[in-house]
Image (cartoon, rainbow, N blue to C red):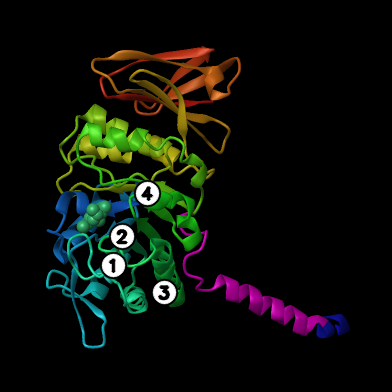
Amino acid sequence: MKITRRYFPILLSFLILFSWGGVGRGQDSMLARTPPMGWNSWNHFACDVSDTVVRAQADAMVATGMKSVGYTYILIDDCWQGTRDDAGYIRPNVKFPDMKALADYIHGEGLKIGIYSSPGPKTCGGYEGSYGHEEQDAETYAVWGMDYLKYDLCSYDGMGAQIPAYRKMYDALKKTRRPIVYALCQYGMQKGWEWAASVGGNLWRTDDDIRDNYFSMAELGFGQNGLERFAGPGHWNDPDMLEIGNGGMTDDEYRTHMSLWCILAAPLLAGNNLVTMGAATKAILTNPEVIAIDQDPLGVQGHRVTQEGPLEVWMKPLEDGSKAVGLFNRGWGAMPVTVGLRDLGVGGSAAMRDLWARKDLGRFQEIYTALVPQHGVVMIKVK
Ligand code: GLA
């Protein structure tokens, strides 16, 4: 009893210290422990986004089963902004009559919501940016109930170094005490991967905008090799959002898109119209075994292990000691792709499972060969 009384003040100060650190710290490493999954308005709707569109996509996220396999964030990209009020607070435009009500609606579905701005005076679409209003904007997002901010470098040229600009918004977000995932969009300029996490970034774009065609997707996705050491739980490389289901690629090409993004531990942000999505698109976006590779708790980004002309083998180590492996054919016509177990750091023989076919393939000695369709992939788990 005596001891307790004597040490009580010390105990109390420890308790205060720890709770101070834990409550409302805003952006911390527990946010985005695995790569964020969700839907973003830009790739399909661009500036045709509205409250009605967003609600319908959220409804579809639930109805299609996307939510149940892990998709969580409903992200409003550019074109939601109106003008500022006399005090300088941002207001949405007429297409978003009540942002707080919209956020409540999304939260009511068990989902999270995100918004978009720019450190410059204007966004990429020419809408109002956050320059000079960083704290007011962060405060507004928190009051609305936003859980995610994409902060896009547009119109910031010549206005000072981008690193302090990104830190400024991070500090403003932190001050709100609301946990808000912080997504930097600066296209890999000034090697963003080297400093983005140090200014609070949970993810950062590593390159230019994706287009809905195989060559754009392949250039971005296969171009990520070497960046794996910058990613990990809470901080991820972002080779841009998904185009799956937007119509510009074949199903084999979209399966490559999904497989590669999962091996890269990339954010999985669907960019199609979830309301009209067909069965093939849904199957590609929702295969739980493929998603589990992206969301593996070890949080290691995969890399290329071999390349022979257009044939590439990529590998992502997983928490249970097994490896996810992608056998990719970037060339014309179907071709056999071979992976050597030794290249994967596996000796002797190993059990394999085909993740798209969702079936065990048996045990293999030294090598495994699969016939891979043009621009396609065979994705396996090696145990
Ligand atoms: C940039 C970004 C895109 C999108 C648009 C919006 O191009 O890279 O992802 O946010 O701006 O204007």
Examine the rendered structure and indicate whether residue 327 appears above or below residue 61: above
Q: Which of marks 3 and 2 is nearer the N terminus?
A: 2
Q: Is mark 4 within 8 Å of ligand 1?
A: no
Residue 362 drawn at (x, y percent): 48, 16
Classify residue 321 as left or right of residue 84: right
Cα distance in 3D space between marks 3 and 4 = 23 Å
Q: Is mark 3 within 8 Å of ligand 1?
A: no
Cα distance in 3D space between marks 3 and 2 = 17 Å
Q: In which quarter of the image is residue 207?
A: top left
State the SS at label 3. helix
Q: Does the residue labelled 2 lie within 8 Å of ligand 1?
A: no
Disc 1 residue type (three-letter): Gly
Q: Which of marks 3 and 4 is nearer the N terminus?
A: 3
State the SS at label 4. loop
Examine the rendered structure and indicate whether residue 152 appears above or below residue 334: below
Residues rendered magenta in the picture: 7-34
The quarter of the image holding the N terminus is: bottom right
Disc 2 residue type (three-letter): Leu
Q: Which of marks 2 and 4 is nearer the N terminus?
A: 2
Q: Name the residue under label 1.
A: 120
Cα distance in 3D space between marks 4 and 1 = 17 Å
Q: Are marks 1 and 3 in contact (CB under 8 Å)?
A: no
Please name the residue shown 37% across and 49% down the image: 188
Q: Earlier in the sequence, mark 2 or mark 1?
A: 1
State the SS at label 1. loop
Q: Mark 2 points at which residue?
A: 153
Q: How crowded is mark 2: few (under 14 residues within 10 Å), some or many (20 or more)?
A: many
